[in-house]
Image (spheres, grey):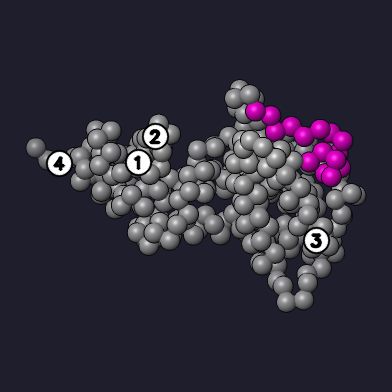
Amino acid sequence: MCPRIVTDEDRQQRDRELLDTALELIQQDNLTSLSMDKLAANVPYSKGTVYNHFCSKEDLLLGLCNCGMEIVADLFDRAAGIQGSGRDHVFALTYAYLLYALLYRDQFFLHVQSKTPSLYEKGSQERLERNLQLEERLLGHVLQAVEQAITEGNLQLKPGWDSMQVAFHLWASAFGAIAVASIKSQSPGPMRVQFKREVFNQMALILDGLGWKPSTSAWKACPVLQQLETIYQSELEALEKQGISLSIPATCSQGENA
């Protein structure tokens, strides 16, 4: 009997099955308890087959991170399609990132927890390259917003800075603010924060500090929010089913409604 030929489609489907199972195992227990042996014990494939798809636990985690980044990339693609100024687009991208963190909480925190040097040292070349492609795609949207603001005359770069540096810090700050604020939103005591408010406050502080126009006090959120609530209708409905709202009061000034 001739052996069954494994097609690219078959391999991708099996990759997806292994990644889904790995995520379920992490959700059931925790990240540190995940192992290749444990994964192999929970799928209808041999350990050798599992290693043919993922060369190490780190490669598996990198695959999970890439899946999450692909979701973010889709959300960013849609955010980039709104009509508005450069500042409007930064707000839209921040909103998209926050939406991802709320709707795909496990994937978001997996990305936070697994950002270690070993992930990149032991990941496969294929997934490392895909990770880089996704990072460039995400950062590219932020860079586009920065360059739009410069073209509009709403942003003048500080001496010694270039648009890529500004884009990187905006992206990194959004990621960090969402990670820290989401953790502190569940903490007892005086360090407890209002998750959504502080994410947008962080963005406002950075943009105002850069001299990005219009300032927070003059900028209006309503036109952007109306577009975002339309393009993310299905995601917002999914959040509501979980008892979570991303609605922002329509007072329209970011400083008031953040």
Q: Earlier in the sequence, mark 2 or mark 3?
A: 2
Give the x, y percent position of residue 16.
38, 39
Give the x, y percent position of residue 32.
38, 44
Q: Earlier in the sequence, mark 4 or mark 1?
A: 4
Q: CA separation, marks 3 and 1?
A: 43 Å
Asked if the residues shown at circle 1 and circle 2 are in contact, with their CB atoms under 8 angstroms apart, the answer is yes
Query: Which stretch is magenta?
Result: 244-258
**Residue 33 numbered tag:** 1
Q: Check disc 4 and report its element: helix, strand or loop.
A: loop
- On the rendered structure, is 124 left or right of 213? left
Q: CA separation, marks 3 and 4?
A: 64 Å
**Residue 29 numbered tag:** 2
Q: Is residue 250 magenta?
A: yes
Q: Check disc 3 and report its element: helix, strand or loop.
A: helix
Q: Is residue 95 magenta?
A: no
Q: Check disc 2 and report its element: helix, strand or loop.
A: loop
Give the x, y percent position of residue 144.
69, 59
The furthest residue to the left: 1
- For the point 63% across and 24% down, the residue is 243
Q: CA separation, marks 2 and 3?
A: 42 Å
